[in-house]
Amino acid sequence: MDEHQIEALTILAQLGGLALQHHGALTKIDRLTQYDSLTGLFNSRYMEQFVHQELSKTTDEVAVISLGICNLELITEPCGSQAADRVILETAKRLKTTAGRASHISRAESGEFFLVTKLMDMDSLRMLCEVLLGSTTQVLEVNEYSIEIETCAGIALGQAENFKALCDQAHIAKNRAHIGTYGFFDEGMNGVSKERLLLSYSLKKAINDSQLKLFYQPQVCPKTMRVLGVEALARWYSPEHGNVSPENSFN
Protein backbone atom coordinates (compact mmCIF):
# COMPACT_ATOMS: atom_id res chain seq x y z
CA MET A 1 0.00 0.00 0.00
CA ASP A 2 1.60 3.27 -1.09
CA GLU A 3 1.55 6.63 0.69
CA HIS A 4 -1.40 8.00 -1.33
CA GLN A 5 -3.58 4.98 -0.53
CA ILE A 6 -2.79 5.28 3.18
CA GLU A 7 -3.66 8.98 3.08
CA ALA A 8 -6.94 8.22 1.27
CA LEU A 9 -7.88 5.57 3.85
CA THR A 10 -7.05 7.99 6.67
CA ILE A 11 -9.31 10.63 5.16
CA LEU A 12 -12.11 8.08 4.68
CA ALA A 13 -11.76 6.98 8.31
CA GLN A 14 -11.95 10.57 9.47
CA LEU A 15 -15.02 11.20 7.31
CA GLY A 16 -16.61 8.02 8.69
CA GLY A 17 -15.93 9.21 12.23
CA LEU A 18 -17.47 12.59 11.47
CA ALA A 19 -20.52 10.89 9.95
CA LEU A 20 -20.97 8.76 13.07
CA GLN A 21 -20.61 11.84 15.29
CA HIS A 22 -23.16 13.67 13.14
CA HIS A 23 -25.58 10.73 13.32
CA GLY A 24 -25.08 10.51 17.09
CA ALA A 25 -25.72 14.24 17.45
CA LEU A 26 -28.90 14.00 15.37
CA THR A 27 -30.09 11.04 17.44
CA LYS A 28 -29.44 12.99 20.64
CA ILE A 29 -31.29 16.03 19.29
CA ASP A 30 -34.24 13.86 18.28
CA ARG A 31 -34.37 12.35 21.75
CA LEU A 32 -34.22 15.77 23.42
CA THR A 33 -37.07 17.05 21.25
CA GLN A 34 -39.24 13.94 21.67
CA TYR A 35 -38.66 12.66 25.20
CA ASP A 36 -38.76 14.06 28.73
CA SER A 37 -35.21 14.32 30.06
CA LEU A 38 -36.06 13.11 33.59
CA THR A 39 -38.39 10.16 32.96
CA GLY A 40 -37.63 9.14 29.37
CA LEU A 41 -41.36 9.33 28.55
CA PHE A 42 -42.76 11.19 25.54
CA ASN A 43 -42.92 14.92 26.06
CA SER A 44 -46.23 16.70 25.44
CA ARG A 45 -45.37 17.94 21.95
CA TYR A 46 -44.22 14.57 20.68
CA MET A 47 -47.18 12.79 22.28
CA GLU A 48 -49.58 15.03 20.37
CA GLN A 49 -47.63 14.43 17.15
CA PHE A 50 -47.59 10.66 17.79
CA VAL A 51 -51.34 10.50 18.38
CA HIS A 52 -52.13 12.47 15.22
CA GLN A 53 -49.66 10.66 12.98
CA GLU A 54 -49.77 7.10 14.32
CA LEU A 55 -52.60 6.33 16.71
CA SER A 56 -55.32 8.09 14.70
CA LYS A 57 -54.55 5.71 11.79
CA THR A 58 -55.63 2.66 13.77
CA THR A 59 -58.46 4.01 15.92
CA ASP A 60 -61.03 6.80 15.93
CA GLU A 61 -61.90 7.11 19.60
CA VAL A 62 -59.45 7.19 22.50
CA ALA A 63 -59.44 7.57 26.25
CA VAL A 64 -57.07 10.17 27.68
CA ILE A 65 -56.17 9.87 31.35
CA SER A 66 -54.52 12.70 33.26
CA LEU A 67 -52.78 11.42 36.40
CA GLY A 68 -51.27 13.92 38.81
CA ILE A 69 -49.15 13.79 41.96
CA CYS A 70 -51.37 15.76 44.35
CA ASN A 71 -48.80 16.47 47.07
CA LEU A 72 -45.70 17.20 44.97
CA GLU A 73 -45.38 20.78 46.26
CA LEU A 74 -45.68 19.57 49.86
CA ILE A 75 -42.89 17.08 49.15
CA THR A 76 -40.65 19.67 47.49
CA GLU A 77 -40.76 22.21 50.33
CA PRO A 78 -39.32 20.08 53.19
CA CYS A 79 -37.49 17.41 51.17
CA GLY A 80 -36.04 19.40 48.28
CA SER A 81 -36.20 19.25 44.48
CA GLN A 82 -34.09 16.08 44.26
CA ALA A 83 -36.63 14.19 46.36
CA ALA A 84 -39.42 15.56 44.17
CA ASP A 85 -37.57 14.34 41.07
CA ARG A 86 -37.27 10.88 42.66
CA VAL A 87 -41.02 10.86 43.26
CA ILE A 88 -41.72 11.89 39.64
CA LEU A 89 -39.30 9.27 38.31
CA GLU A 90 -40.72 6.50 40.49
CA THR A 91 -44.28 7.42 39.50
CA ALA A 92 -43.28 7.27 35.83
CA LYS A 93 -41.75 3.82 36.30
CA ARG A 94 -44.86 2.51 38.03
CA LEU A 95 -47.09 3.94 35.29
CA LYS A 96 -45.02 2.26 32.55
CA THR A 97 -45.11 -1.06 34.41
CA THR A 98 -48.83 -0.90 35.13
CA ALA A 99 -50.15 0.55 31.87
CA GLY A 100 -48.29 -1.88 29.62
CA ARG A 101 -47.90 -1.60 25.87
CA ALA A 102 -51.56 -0.82 25.20
CA SER A 103 -51.16 2.72 26.56
CA HIS A 104 -48.83 5.52 25.53
CA ILE A 105 -47.56 7.84 28.28
CA SER A 106 -46.19 11.35 28.34
CA ARG A 107 -45.05 13.64 31.10
CA ALA A 108 -46.56 17.11 31.04
CA GLU A 109 -45.72 19.84 33.53
CA SER A 110 -44.18 18.94 36.88
CA GLY A 111 -46.05 15.97 38.37
CA GLU A 112 -48.73 15.43 35.71
CA PHE A 113 -48.77 12.54 33.24
CA PHE A 114 -51.04 11.78 30.31
CA LEU A 115 -51.94 8.28 29.16
CA VAL A 116 -53.74 7.64 25.89
CA THR A 117 -55.24 4.31 24.92
CA LYS A 118 -57.80 2.99 22.47
CA LEU A 119 -61.29 3.43 23.81
CA MET A 120 -62.33 0.30 25.70
CA ASP A 121 -65.47 -0.70 27.56
CA MET A 122 -66.18 1.31 30.69
CA ASP A 123 -65.52 -1.53 33.12
CA SER A 124 -62.05 -2.11 31.67
CA LEU A 125 -61.33 1.63 31.69
CA ARG A 126 -62.39 1.98 35.32
CA MET A 127 -60.29 -1.04 36.27
CA LEU A 128 -57.27 0.50 34.49
CA CYS A 129 -57.67 3.75 36.45
CA GLU A 130 -58.00 1.91 39.74
CA VAL A 131 -54.86 -0.11 39.02
CA LEU A 132 -52.94 3.03 37.99
CA LEU A 133 -53.94 4.84 41.17
CA GLY A 134 -53.19 1.78 43.28
CA SER A 135 -49.71 1.42 41.84
CA THR A 136 -48.79 5.10 42.19
CA THR A 137 -50.37 5.90 45.57
CA GLN A 138 -47.68 4.29 47.71
CA VAL A 139 -44.86 5.06 50.13
CA LEU A 140 -41.39 5.83 48.74
CA GLU A 141 -38.21 5.90 50.82
CA VAL A 142 -35.98 8.86 49.78
CA ASN A 143 -32.85 9.34 51.89
CA GLU A 144 -34.10 9.78 55.46
CA TYR A 145 -37.64 10.61 54.34
CA SER A 146 -40.56 8.22 54.06
CA ILE A 147 -42.76 9.89 51.45
CA GLU A 148 -46.36 8.91 50.77
CA ILE A 149 -47.15 9.61 47.12
CA GLU A 150 -50.74 10.80 46.62
CA THR A 151 -52.27 10.72 43.15
CA CYS A 152 -55.61 11.34 41.46
CA ALA A 153 -56.81 11.06 37.87
CA GLY A 154 -59.23 12.48 35.32
CA ILE A 155 -60.55 10.84 32.15
CA ALA A 156 -61.80 12.29 28.86
CA LEU A 157 -63.21 10.34 25.93
CA GLY A 158 -63.35 11.39 22.30
CA GLN A 159 -61.82 11.46 18.85
CA ALA A 160 -58.07 10.96 18.53
CA GLU A 161 -57.84 14.01 16.25
CA ASN A 162 -59.04 16.15 19.20
CA PHE A 163 -56.23 14.95 21.44
CA LYS A 164 -55.17 18.39 22.72
CA ALA A 165 -58.73 19.25 23.77
CA LEU A 166 -59.09 15.83 25.43
CA CYS A 167 -55.92 16.52 27.45
CA ASP A 168 -57.41 19.80 28.67
CA GLN A 169 -60.65 18.03 29.61
CA ALA A 170 -58.85 15.20 31.42
CA HIS A 171 -56.79 17.82 33.29
CA ILE A 172 -59.98 19.56 34.46
CA ALA A 173 -61.51 16.25 35.59
CA LYS A 174 -58.28 15.39 37.45
CA ASN A 175 -58.34 18.72 39.30
CA ARG A 176 -61.90 17.97 40.46
CA ALA A 177 -61.04 14.48 41.74
CA HIS A 178 -60.02 13.74 45.32
CA ILE A 179 -56.81 12.03 46.37
CA GLY A 180 -56.82 8.37 45.38
CA THR A 181 -59.87 8.74 43.12
CA TYR A 182 -60.66 9.47 39.47
CA GLY A 183 -63.45 11.21 37.61
CA PHE A 184 -64.81 11.53 34.08
CA PHE A 185 -64.99 14.88 32.33
CA ASP A 186 -68.39 16.36 31.53
CA GLU A 187 -69.29 19.70 29.97
CA GLY A 188 -70.51 21.06 33.31
CA MET A 189 -66.93 20.92 34.57
CA ASN A 190 -65.82 23.09 31.65
CA GLY A 191 -68.23 25.82 32.70
CA VAL A 192 -67.07 25.65 36.32
CA SER A 193 -63.43 25.76 35.23
CA LYS A 194 -63.99 28.84 33.04
CA GLU A 195 -65.91 30.57 35.84
CA ARG A 196 -63.08 29.94 38.31
CA LEU A 197 -60.53 31.19 35.80
CA LEU A 198 -62.48 34.42 35.30
CA LEU A 199 -62.81 34.84 39.06
CA SER A 200 -59.06 34.34 39.57
CA TYR A 201 -58.30 37.10 37.07
CA SER A 202 -60.92 39.36 38.69
CA LEU A 203 -59.48 38.67 42.14
CA LYS A 204 -56.02 39.86 41.08
CA LYS A 205 -57.59 43.09 39.85
CA ALA A 206 -59.68 43.36 43.02
CA ILE A 207 -56.54 43.27 45.18
CA ASN A 208 -54.96 46.06 43.14
CA ASP A 209 -58.21 48.10 43.23
CA SER A 210 -58.69 47.59 47.02
CA GLN A 211 -62.02 45.81 46.56
CA LEU A 212 -61.31 43.44 49.46
CA LYS A 213 -62.66 44.64 52.78
CA LEU A 214 -61.56 43.49 56.22
CA PHE A 215 -64.15 42.57 58.84
CA TYR A 216 -63.62 41.46 62.42
CA GLN A 217 -65.76 38.75 63.98
CA PRO A 218 -65.64 38.40 67.78
CA GLN A 219 -64.87 35.02 69.32
CA VAL A 220 -67.02 34.57 72.41
CA CYS A 221 -66.80 32.02 75.21
CA PRO A 222 -70.22 30.24 75.28
CA LYS A 223 -70.10 29.79 79.07
CA THR A 224 -69.06 33.26 80.22
CA MET A 225 -70.09 35.20 77.09
CA ARG A 226 -66.80 37.03 77.33
CA VAL A 227 -65.05 38.13 74.16
CA LEU A 228 -61.85 36.09 73.90
CA GLY A 229 -60.54 37.55 70.67
CA VAL A 230 -61.46 38.46 67.14
CA GLU A 231 -61.21 36.69 63.80
CA ALA A 232 -60.16 38.74 60.77
CA LEU A 233 -62.21 37.97 57.65
CA ALA A 234 -61.65 39.23 54.11
CA ARG A 235 -64.77 39.87 52.04
CA TRP A 236 -64.91 40.74 48.37
CA TYR A 237 -67.58 42.83 46.69
CA SER A 238 -67.00 42.86 42.93
CA PRO A 239 -68.72 45.47 40.72
CA GLU A 240 -68.94 42.72 38.07
CA HIS A 241 -69.83 39.63 40.16
CA GLY A 242 -71.45 41.22 43.25
CA ASN A 243 -70.73 39.64 46.64
CA VAL A 244 -68.36 36.74 45.90
CA SER A 245 -68.43 33.80 48.28
CA PRO A 246 -65.06 32.91 49.88
CA GLU A 247 -65.70 29.32 48.76
CA ASN A 248 -65.56 30.47 45.13
CA SER A 249 -62.90 33.16 45.39
CA PHE A 250 -60.29 31.51 47.60
CA ASN A 251 -60.49 27.81 46.61
Image (cartoon, helix red, strand yellow):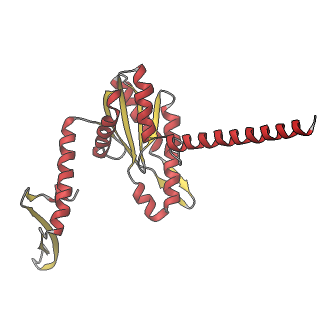
Quadrant hosting residue 164: top left
* Residue 215 falls left or right of residue 34: left
Q: Nearer the viewer, residue 192 or 71?
A: 192
**Residue 28 x, y percent position in the rendering:** 59, 43
Q: Residue at x 91, y 40 (%)?
A: 3
The number of numbered discs placed on residues in the rendered structure image is 0
Q: Nearer the viewer, residue 204 or 251?
A: 204
Q: Residue at x 85, y 40 (%)?
A: 7
The C terminus: image quadrant? bottom left
**Residue 29 x, y percent position in the rendering:** 56, 43
In the rendered image of this protein, does residue 46 appear above or below residue 219? above
Q: Nearer the viewer, residue 139 or 164?
A: 164
Viewer can see residue 144: yes
Viewer can see residue 134: no
* Residue 71 falls left or right of residue 11: left
Q: Nearer the viewer, residue 14 or 39?
A: 14
The N terminus: image quadrant? top right
In the rendered image of this protein, does residue 105 appear above or below residue 59? below
**Residue 175 x, y percent position in the rendering:** 30, 46
